[in-house]
Amino acid sequence: MSKQKIIVGLSGGVDSSVATLMLLQQGYEVEALFMKNWEEDDTNDVCTAEQDLSDAQKVADKLGVKLHTVNFSADYWEDVFADFLQQHKKGRTPNPDVLCNQKIKFKVFLEYALALGADKIATGHYARITNNDNAYQLKVGLDNNKDQSYFLHLLGQYQLSKSLFPLGDISKTRVREIAAQHGLITADKKDSTGICFIGERNFSEFLQTYLPKQPGNMVDENGQFIKPHQGLAFYTIGQRKGLEIGGGFSDSPEPWFVADKRIESNELLVVQGDHSLLYHNALTTSKQHWIGDLPDFPLKCQAKIRYRQASQTCEIIKNADSIKVIFKQPQRAITPGQSIVFYQDDVCLGGAIIEQRNNE
């Protein structure tokens, strides 16, 4: 019986480097693929992309695997970034990393790898896949601090059947140890953060290169004018940094936060401190996606309204064309456009897009 051929997405980071190594140790026939998904528009981007490709090539050479390179920039723009901009125009806050996994890494990359003769693809995500009677489950990574199941919740049975996550059972600390032990150049490389494939930037400035400013007023809970804003697209619910509201607007020294975006009046509602207007105990959703069979409703489970949040106890109620989520405890800064992801213990059930929040 011939070995299964796995093509691993090798980004030039430590996680995908160790994933490649582990697949080799497990006896697979391994090749790697470096994806370019963003056309650089400044010198810093070019340096970063070139460095990542150079590091990926050095890891591939060290491990003796073939490295393919491919440019998916047009797919990324059309399937991820255009939607990202459209959602921001509407005053919402989308999560491009979630869409990037669904549309690029586990669709375009998967199709490309299969065309190259792969049986499956692999990535350096911290998550696990199990198979019980041909029903695939997505489970959280054992390193709670690095679990990335939140970003993978739009995968379905087919994608899970064609994917491997070699790092799901180990910790980030162990990953770096393995990289160092095997002399991989990425062992001490800093983790990438920021938007999927776009990287770290001043977010508001970045958006303003693509979206026009639509100035309006920042107001407090009483409708009192605070200062102008540049456009609702450039702010997010719960935001503190970048509001630039100094002293003189209130007797209180507490920091200001964005509590709401009033689309019709183009007003940004800001409040001070841990204000009640930042909290809601219910939300409605659109675009529900379930990894396995449709669950029975009402469903008691746990949910996260953002990455790295601790799981929150909730109940899901099915409506005609949406679902309503009611939390046991009020949640801070529920943000329309973001993903809510559902769990039962260590199993990721799926998720949905947050549309509206309210209090029951």
Image (cartoon, rainbow, N blue to C red):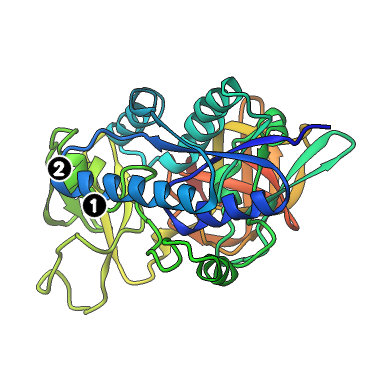
Q: Amino acid at mark 2?
A: Asp
Is disc 2 surrounded by few (<14), some (14 to 19) or many (20+) residues within 10 Å? few
Picture coordinates of residue 89, whole percent (x, y): 27, 32
- Residue 104 lies left or right of residue 171; in this view the side is left
**Can residue 4 be seen?**
yes
Judge left or right: residue 139 versus residue 190: right
**SS at mark 1 in the image:** loop
Label 2 vs 1, first from the N-terminus? 2
- The image quadrant of residue 140 is bottom right
Disc 2 versus disc 1: nearer the observer: 2
Q: Is residue 204 above or below residue 170?
A: above
Q: Identify which residue is drawn at 59% across, 70% down.
A: 174
Q: Which residue is mark 1?
A: 201
Q: Amino acid at mark 1?
A: Arg
Nearest to the observer: residue 91 or residue 351: 351
| Residue 42 numbered mark, or none | 2
